[in-house]
């Protein structure tokens, strides 16, 4: 990798890593994030054609101490974790552990309670199952007990007829994925362990769904979060319907995002949550690890053993629910498939409809673009107020595509 360290006209922040020849525009925008866009600490990595072409990090890991972001700094990526969980499900699908049109109850009989007998795995992974807002209050203690949690999730009633509509399963998507995987994996591994063994380790990705106790906490970037009420000041960047519904206690949006009860999204960065397996929101690791995983998917997933059948499902257009594509939790049009988000009119990414990925609260985003062979990830430690297309991330993504001419 050729390191380009061209000085900025403004006082340069601490920036490490480098880019391959031709990708200097990505590094220039990364520096501008600090000098012009209030970045505190962040990392960005990009693979093109299976080769790492961008690996950048900079700023401070901890705004209180001023400690710099280092090469091995890890960061909480919130719902960008969903893509890592979905990658594990894709590996399991390739291994013949389930079919997407199987009823969930085929593998998890207790799930059939309360009218869920016909819910398919495809519907579950597409946020169409109506299981976004649990009736029971989730606590760290409950989330840590997989057996008790599984019983509660199996008894949960649906919020709409599965397949009729979709709504963002902000936390529960990963909980259901893990319970399903425990039942189809011959080793009975929950999703976090399955991901480590079948996705992260084969690619050398330093990323975890459930942080091990032996990881040095000094490696982890501290999240500078916002309080939910602050969203009212940013209704020009966040969907107004989402913000207003979130602030209404009886709304489906509030019941979805308000469980577990948190003072702010940054609570997921507390030690009590870091150690939990939260496959939809709690992944922590190096940004380059996420990019490496998407980089393999972008060139067919051979290193992960992804079958042609699975790749075809990942790249296929999403199947819209019967009532249309408006997300009843987020209040905007969204497209989902196989645990991933797909491009939509309000959130376009990649060069064609085959791209898939997930964004995370505060500005992180990772995706695979099979048309251009791109695997991308960016994550900061200062949370922004965009549902997607955070300007700090978008300028980096756009610079990548300008460079490759796509």
Image (cartoon, rainbow, N blue to C red):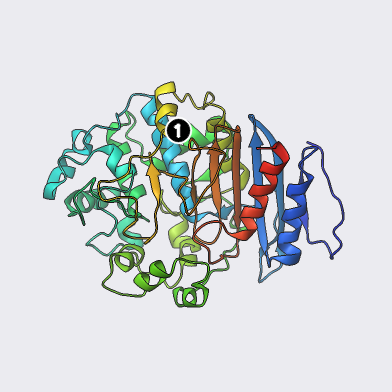
317 w.r.t. 304: above or below: below
Image quarter where the C terminus lies is top right
- Badge 1 marks a residue whose secondary structure is helix
Residue 290 coordinates in the image, percent (x, y): 56, 42
Q: Quadrant of residue 160?
A: bottom left
Residue 123 coordinates in the image, percent (x, y): 28, 42
31 w.r.t. 24: above or below: below
| Residue at horizontal 62 percent and vertical 60 percent from the top | 391
Image quarter where the N terminus lies is top right
| Residue at horizontal 69 percent and vertical 37 percent from the top | 405
Q: Is residue 246 left or right of residue 198?
A: left
- Nearest the eye: 45 or 178: 45
| Residue at horizontal 16 percent and vertical 45 percent from the top | 116
- Nearest the eye: 317 or 113: 317
Residue 295 coordinates in the image, percent (x, y): 58, 34
| Neighbours of disc 1 within 10 Å: few (<14), some (14-19), many (20+) | many
Q: Is residue 72 visible?
A: no
- Nearest the eye: 374 or 113: 374
Q: Quadrant of residue 177?
A: top left
Q: Is residue 234 visible?
A: yes
Residue 346 coordinates in the image, percent (x, y): 48, 54
- What residue did someone put label 1 on? 315
Extreme left residue here?
114
Q: Is residue 9 left or right of residue 134?
A: right
Q: Quadrant of residue 109?
A: top left
């Amino acid at each position: 990798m050729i390191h380009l360290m061209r000085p900025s006209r403004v006082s340069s922040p601490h920036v490490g890593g480098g880019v391959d020849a031709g990708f200097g525009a990505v590094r220039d925008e990364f520096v501008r994030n600090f000098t012009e866009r209030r970045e505190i600490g962040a990392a960005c990595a990009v693979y093109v054609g299976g080769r790492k072409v961008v690996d950048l990090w900079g700023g401070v890991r901890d705004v209180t101490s001023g400690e710099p972001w280092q090469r091995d700094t890890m960061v909480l990526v919130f719902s960008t974790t969903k893509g890592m969980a979905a990658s594990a499900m894709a590996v399991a699908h390739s291994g013949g552990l389930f079919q997407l049109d199987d009823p969930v109850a085929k593998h998890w009989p207790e799930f059939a309670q309360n009218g869920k007998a016909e819910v398919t795995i495809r519907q579950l992974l597409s946020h169409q199952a109506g299981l976004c807002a649990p009736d029971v209050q989730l606590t760290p203690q409950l989330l840590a007990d997989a057996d008790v949690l599984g019983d509660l999730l199996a008894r949960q009633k649906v919020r709409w007829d599965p397949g009729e509509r979709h709504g963002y399963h902000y936390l529960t998507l990963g909980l259901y994925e893990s319970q399903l995987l425990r039942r189809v994996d011959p080793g009975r591994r929950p999703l976090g362990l399955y991901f480590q063994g079948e996705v992260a380790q084969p690619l050398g990705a330093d990323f975890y769904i459930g942080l091990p106790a032996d990881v040095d906490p000094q490696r982890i970037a501290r999240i500078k979060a916002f309080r939910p009420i602050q969203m009212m000041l940013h209704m020009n960047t966040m969907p107004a319907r989402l913000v207003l519904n979130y602030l209404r206690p009886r709304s489906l949006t509030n019941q979805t995002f308000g469980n577990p009860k948190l003072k702010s999204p940054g609570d997921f960065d507390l030690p009590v949550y870091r150690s939990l397996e939260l496959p939809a929101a709690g992944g922590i690791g190096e940004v380059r690890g996420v990019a490496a995983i998407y980089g393999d998917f972008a060139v067919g997933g051979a290193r992960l053993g992804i079958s042609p059948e699975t790749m075809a499902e990942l790249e296929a257009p999403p199947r819209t629910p019967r009532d249309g594509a408006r997300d009843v939790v987020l209040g905007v049009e969204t497209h989902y498939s196989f645990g991933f988000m797909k491009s939509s009119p309000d959130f376009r990414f990649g060069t064609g409809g085959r791209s898939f990925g997930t964004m995370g609260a505060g500005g992180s985003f990772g995706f695979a673009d099979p048309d251009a062979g791109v695997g991308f990830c960016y994550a900061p430690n200062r949370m922004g107020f965009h549902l997607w297309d955070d300007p700090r991330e978008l300028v980096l993504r756009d610079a990548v595509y300008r460079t490759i001419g796509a």
